[in-house]
Image (cartoon, rainbow, N blue to C red):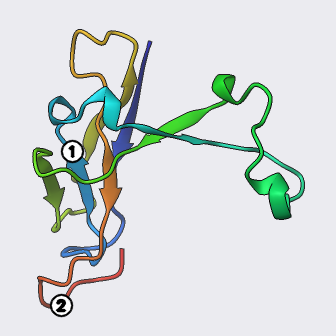
């Protein structure tokens, strides 16, 4: 099973918060920390925020990675509305690059950036 995403911008470049993609070949499985999606009717309070949740390992979760010097990041600061990126969120075939960590970051290096 493959899960992918199309990404495009609606604001002209250069954007103040560009999308950055990490080469999945530079990230190891041991670096991943699970980020589980909890769907609730009410936000828990106190200790209920951190207690283990039954079945959490079966819930929808993304992975979070801390920066490592070996990671290879690419970003697109000047995307136009007709530019599109396609990248994998997940692929069940782990013999190939099976994920593409991604994020946005505040880029103050370019003059006249526009709100993304």
Quarter holding the N terminus is top left
Q: Tell me how far mark 2 sits from mark 1, CA to CA.
A: 26 Å
Residue drawn 17% across the image and 67% down it? 77
Taking 25 as reference, is 64 above or below it?
below
Residue drawn 32% across the image and 27% down it? 29
The residue lying furthest to the right in this view is: 41
The residue lying furthest to the bottom in this view is: 112
Residue 43 visible in image: no
Which of disc 1 and disc 2 is earlier in sequence? 1
Relative horizontal placement of residue 52, taking residue 22 as reference (left or right)? right
Taking 65 as reference, is 108 above or below it?
below
Q: Which residue lies under the disc numbered 2?
A: 112
In depth, the one of 84 and 107 nearer the eye is 107
Confirm or deny contact between disc 2 and disc 1 (CB under 8 A): no
Which percent across, then down, holds residue 56?
A: 70, 30
Quarter holding the C terminus is bottom left
Which percent across, then down, holds residue 90?
A: 39, 25
Taking 61 as reference, is 95 above or below it?
above
In depth, the one of 16 and 106 nearer the eye is 106
Local crowd at mark 1 within 10 Å, few (<14), some, or many (≥20)?
A: some
Residue drawn 29% across the image and 22% down it? 98
Local crowd at mark 2 within 10 Å, few (<14), some, or many (≥20)?
A: few
Residue drawn 25% across the image and 54% down it? 67
Select label 2 or label 1 by which is in front: 1
Q: Which residue lies under the disc numbered 1?
A: 22
Which percent across, then down, holds residue 65?
A: 35, 46
Relative horizontal placement of residue 24, taking residue 49 as reference (left or right)? left
In depth, the one of 92 and 28 nearer the eye is 28
Which percent across, then down, holds residue 52?
A: 75, 38
Say what secondary structure mark 1 lies in: strand
């Amino acid at each position: 099973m493959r899960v992918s995403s199309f990404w495009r911008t609606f604001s002209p470049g250069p954007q103040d918060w560009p999308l950055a993609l990490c080469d999945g070949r530079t990230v190891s499985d041991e670096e991943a920390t699970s980020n589980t999606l909890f769907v609730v009717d009410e936000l828990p309070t106190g200790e209920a925020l951190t207690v283990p949740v039954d079945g959490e390992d079966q819930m929808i979760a993304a992975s979070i990675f801390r920066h490592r010097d070996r990671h290879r990041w690419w970003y697109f600061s000047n995307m136009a509305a007709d530019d599109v990126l396609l990248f994998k969120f997940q692929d069940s075939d782990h013999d190939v690059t099976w994920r593409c960590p991604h994020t946005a970051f505040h880029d103050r290096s370019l003059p006249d950036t526009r709100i993304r």
